[in-house]
Image (spheres, rainbow, N blue to C red):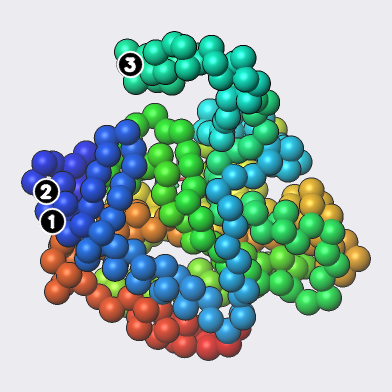
Amino acid sequence: MTGPLMTGERLDALARAGLVWHPTGEAALRGPLLRLADDCDRAFVRLASGWEAQEERHPATLPAELLQRVDYLRSFPHQATFAVAMDGDEANLEAFLSGPVLTGSGAVAPAALAPVRDVLTPAACYHLYRAHEGESLDRPLHLTTRNTCFRREHEYVPLRRLRSFSMREVVCLGTRAETAAFLAALRERVERFCELVGLPVEWANATDPFFRPQRNPKALLQRIAPVKHEAVYGDLAIGSTNDHHDRFGEGFGIDRDGAPAHSACVAFGIERWLFALTDRHGTDPAGWPALPDAAAEAADAAGGRP
Ligand code: ATP
Ligand code: ZN
Ligand code: MG
């Protein structure tokens, strides 16, 4: 298993399989790796078969005001990235155009900005709580979505740590018992799936990367009562299970059984699966396992319908 850095040889092999790497932290995919990414995504959805998780597709941004209901900006200011626009005032735009437009370092030349109100999606599932705001659930609600997620990180490493990456999530909103049962059952399926596709994965307690954790009561709470577990390949988290308690139910007014709904999500970082699968099985597609079939088998083996 390789460490965090990648040799030129490894990168060349990935390039031949379809990785286009931009050192600014973005990965484009084509050819075999793109097909593998699509297969991963199909497999993750198939792992959730039986819950009838409704698929939703959401935009790239979220209003900061909505994220702030769950204290996002105070918890993760170091990771947040924003969609910004110039102030549309004609004089402002004229002044911008009369300048160099770009600075010598390639940054956009200073101009007055319109108020910043939108955050680029940090995790795919946030959109779902907003979309179901104010609902009273008479049974548990299962949803799935996928989005491009944006994170500011200290460094960017091909397929492992990206500025924008693809996240598939499966979410359950319900009572505490319903979300707990969902997490346990889906985790069992993920374990079985990893065995079937030959990926050695371990589970570890994790904490979200809060800004200044020593000063943040939420970070302390996560350490006392772990709510996040990561599926780790080598030293890389390729997925996580997250128990939000009733934080989103309360923040978005979603009720179940007369009380704020509990929620839980299972998140898969698709590019990291590409890293793990090619690390384990090589970059020649002939050596890759049949992912959607393995997912169907894992879902059946772990008890069929939940
Ligand atoms: P890490 O501890 O590695 O930074 P995280 O705790 O920030 O991960 P989550 O917020 O749980 O990650 O996001 C869900 C999944 O998205 C992760 O398990 C991982 O597979 C993937 N992921 C997170 N950050 C990145 C990134 N910068 N580039 C690529 N994939 C990522
Ligand atoms: Zn989530
Ligand atoms: Mg992180």
Q: Is residue 140 left or right of residue 169?
A: right
- Against 295, residue 98 (above or below) is above
Q: CA distance from mark 1 to mark 2?
A: 6 Å
Pinpoint residue 53: horizontal percent, then vertical percent: 61, 75
Q: Nearer the viewer, mark 3 or mark 1?
A: 3
Of the residues under marks 3 and 1, which one precedes in the sequence?
A: 1
Q: Which residue carries the number 2 mark?
A: 12
* Amino acid carrying mark 2 in the image: Asp
What is the residue that sits farthest to the left in this orientation? Answer: 9
- Against 57, residue 156 (above or below) is above
Q: Is residue 250 left or right of residue 72?
A: right
Q: How many marks?
A: 3
* Amino acid carrying mark 3 in the image: Ser
Could you tell me if the residues under marks 2 and 3 are in contact, i.e. CB atoms within 8 Å? no
Q: Nearer the viewer, residue 47 or 2?
A: 47
Q: Which residue carries the number 3 mark?
A: 105
Q: CA distance from mark 3 to mark 1?
A: 31 Å
Q: Mark 1, residues whose alpha carbon is within 10 Å: few (<14), some, or many (≥20)?
A: some
Label 3 CB-ligand 1 distance < 8 A:
no
Seen at 17% across and 70% down, the residue is: 285
Q: Which residue carries the number 1 mark?
A: 16
- Against 176, residue 215 (above or below) is above
